[in-house]
Image: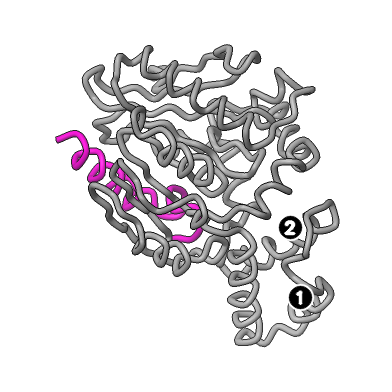
Amino acid sequence: MKTEKQYTEEYVRIGGIEQYLLHYRSKPEDPVLLFIHGGPGQTESFFAFLVEEYAERDYNIVYYDQRGAGKTWLKNKKSRPDMEILKRDLLEIVLYMKKQYVKEKIGIVGHSWGSVLGSMFALEHPEHTLCYIGCGQVINIVENERTGYEILKEAIGKGGNKRDQKKLEKIGVYPPPQFDLKAYRKMGQIRRLQGKYRLAQDFDRTVIDLWRRSPVTGVRDLIPFVTGVSVNMQLMRELMTYDLRKKGSSYQVPVYYVLGEKDSQTPVGISITYLETVQAPEKNLYLISDAGHAPMIDNVEDYRKAVREIVRRVHP
């Protein structure tokens, strides 16, 4: 017996190109959240089913593949994103969602790189923003990488694995002074080691397993994961100079951070220190136990509880 699909998919013309949106709908009167994925260039709509299907949910949520990522890239292979283009795309998507769902404001959920776009949107467009929820929150990418490297170095030292110690020594200076393909390869080596020591997402296991189980992806959808770096190279260079603290800490909307307590890819200490400086109508921190950079994968139930509580606070 076939079960009814829990989602709907569509392509919408945003910024002059067809962009992919994945909707998990609740009741029309419920608030709406927009999930902004990480990367850059690494779509996360493929694991939406893990969080949203058959879940107790009193909000509508939309996942979208950014320009240069996922199904959006597959339809627009010549399009190359930069920060300003993606900010314009995001504004247009929010305006589209407000119209489609008949809402005055939309809640923004930003994960990893998506937290860069999400934070800037909340700061610059409070008139459209119900609240901002940051997961794997990026404050300063260079500081994140430097701190994460030191945490990894300590973990390898405690573990006494000499092979991993040699791998770390071979990587050399980290983070590198500028971003290029060589720097990206170093970042990939660091991520694999962080995954091994449960300090970052283990891409080779968890993510690939979710990909295989996802109802919205197939073999063709793997291509953008391979091309993501070259397509988003300009964006990565811009990201290496990004510092949220320079954008300000005065928000006109509620701000909530949902962070994995073990996250060393975007180290929680850096995110919490920034959150302490935030001025907002309301702010709160949700630390997700036994979770790293992707709390929505590592501890689905506690992540869901946190999001549900946030929604109830902003939409009683």
Q: Quadrant of the C terminus?
A: top left
* In magenta stretch: residue 305: yes
* Classed neighbour count for the residue bearing mark 2: other residues with Cα under 10 Å, few (<14), some (14–19), many (≥20): few
Amino acid of disc 1 = Leu
Find residue 235 and report its horizontal and vertical position in percent.
70, 41
Q: Callout 1: helix, strand or loop?
A: helix
Q: Which residue is mark 2?
A: 188
User: Mark 1 — residue?
Assistant: 168
The stretch drawn in magenta includes residue 286: no
The amino acid type, in three-letter code, at marker 2 is Gly
Q: Is residue 54 left or right of residue 170?
A: left
- Mark 2 vs 1, N-terminal side: 1
Q: Any mark on residue 209, and which?
A: none
Local SS, label 2: helix
- Residue at 41%, 39% (x, y): give it: 122
Position of the N terminus, as image quadrant, is: top left
The reply to whether dot 2 and dot 1 touch (C-beta < 8 Å) is no
Q: Give the residue displayed 71% in from the left and 34% down from the top.
A: 222
Span highlighted in magenta in the image: 290-316
Q: Quadrant of residue 127?
A: top left
Q: Residues within 10 Å of mark 1 (few under 14, many from 20)?
A: many
